Image (tube, helix red, strand yellow):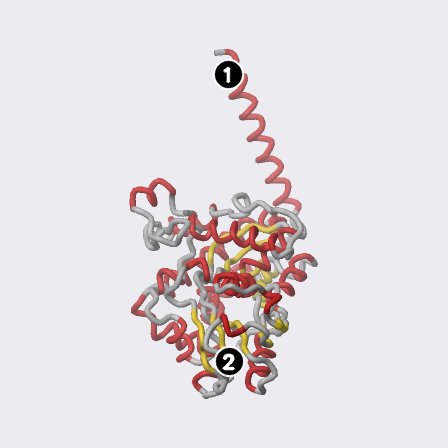
Amino acid sequence: MQFNIFRRRVLAMLAAGLAVTFAAATANAEPLTTVRIGVATAGGGNPISWGGSPGSVARLNGWLEEAFKPDGVKVEWLFFKGAGPAVNEALSNKQIDFAYHGDLPSVVGRANGLKTRILLVSGARNNLYVVTPPDSDIKSIEDLKGKRVSIFRGTNGHLVANNLLNAHGLKERDIKGINLDTGSAQAALASKGVDAAFGGQEFFKLRDQGLVKIVYSTQGQDPSFTRQAHLHVRDEFATEHPEAVQRVVDVFVRAAAWASDEKNRDALFKLWARSGTPYESYVAEFENQQLAVRNSPLIDDFIIGRYKAVVSDALKLRLIRREVSVDDWFDPSFLQNALKKQGLEHRWTSFDVKGQPKPQAQVAAAGSGG
């Protein structure tokens, strides 16, 4: 009995100590004047944006600016042609506070000591394609052996490309891999500077212009051959400005809800097309796929499992040198608050580690965060 009383007192003292530490951290923080969000793509359009993610809905509608305007806080969006690796550098240098980022580059950043929290998913199950010039004799992944193939190394498509090669009896060393960013890969294909390229929805535009053909697609296949993207925040910023983090997450969840509504499909693709990628490309990318699956913000078992797999694959390919933890990387607390405030706790389906819908009983037990 005395031991239990003592234990409760110790726990109370620890809790009080943590509260004091947290209060001190927020009290000593500089007043917030600007929220800076990095996006792992060069983007396009005016204003510069990107497509294929609920985050771009918030960007194009000005919802974050609207949320912070009453406090006079400015919102800055920074776009990086160097994609994930460039965003890691910006996070490391504290040039940005939040980042829209892919799974592999974020894992690499974590392995190199970046301290961030993954807040929500913002673009799940992104497809990957193999494209070639229209007159190419390449008809399958097996035909890539010995060919000049563009792979944007260090991005979330890099590991999926390697996994697809492995699934078809090849390794990256079996091709003549050329590291090109998205724009350079498109130019190289059009000029036949490469024989093939791995990439995303950006290649549909070239296909519709007759400049390339798609010889392989992950659409409708094993969801482990897809790419995931998320919103994460520097841990230091989250500690100093938790209210700002909640406000950002609230807006991203609002955007995810709108982007998940099938009645908005046409309007969504037209909105995304303002980034410079044609409307028809999004129609093709999301063909026969539910918006609520692709645009769900949930951190479920499938998402956590994919990030663990990325860590494992990155170690095998020596893209990282040490194991990194995943479970303590996700912070669903802000997401759960946003879901509750907006009455969206049951809006999206949670998926198991294989990407299959969870039985409702399991979902209820797991909670809104996964």
Quadrant in which residue 10 is drawn: top right
Q: In this view, does 353 lie above or below 95?
A: above
Q: Is residue 53 above or below residue 270?
A: above
The kind of secondary structure element at disc 1 is helix
Q: Residue at x 51, y 47 (%)?
A: 331
Residue 103 appears in view: yes
Q: Is residue 249 above or below residue 276?
A: above
Residue 5 is marked as 1
Q: Is residue 92 left or right of residue 273?
A: right
Closer to the chain start, of discs 1 and 2, is 1
For the residues labelled 1 and 2, the Cα–Cα distance comes to 71 Å
Quadrant in which residue 87 is drawn: bottom right
Q: Which residue is drawn at 63% across and 49% down?
A: 115
Q: Which residue lies furthest to the top in this view?
A: 2
Q: Is residue 367 above or below residue 5?
A: below
Q: In this view, does 249 lie to the left or right of 290?
A: right
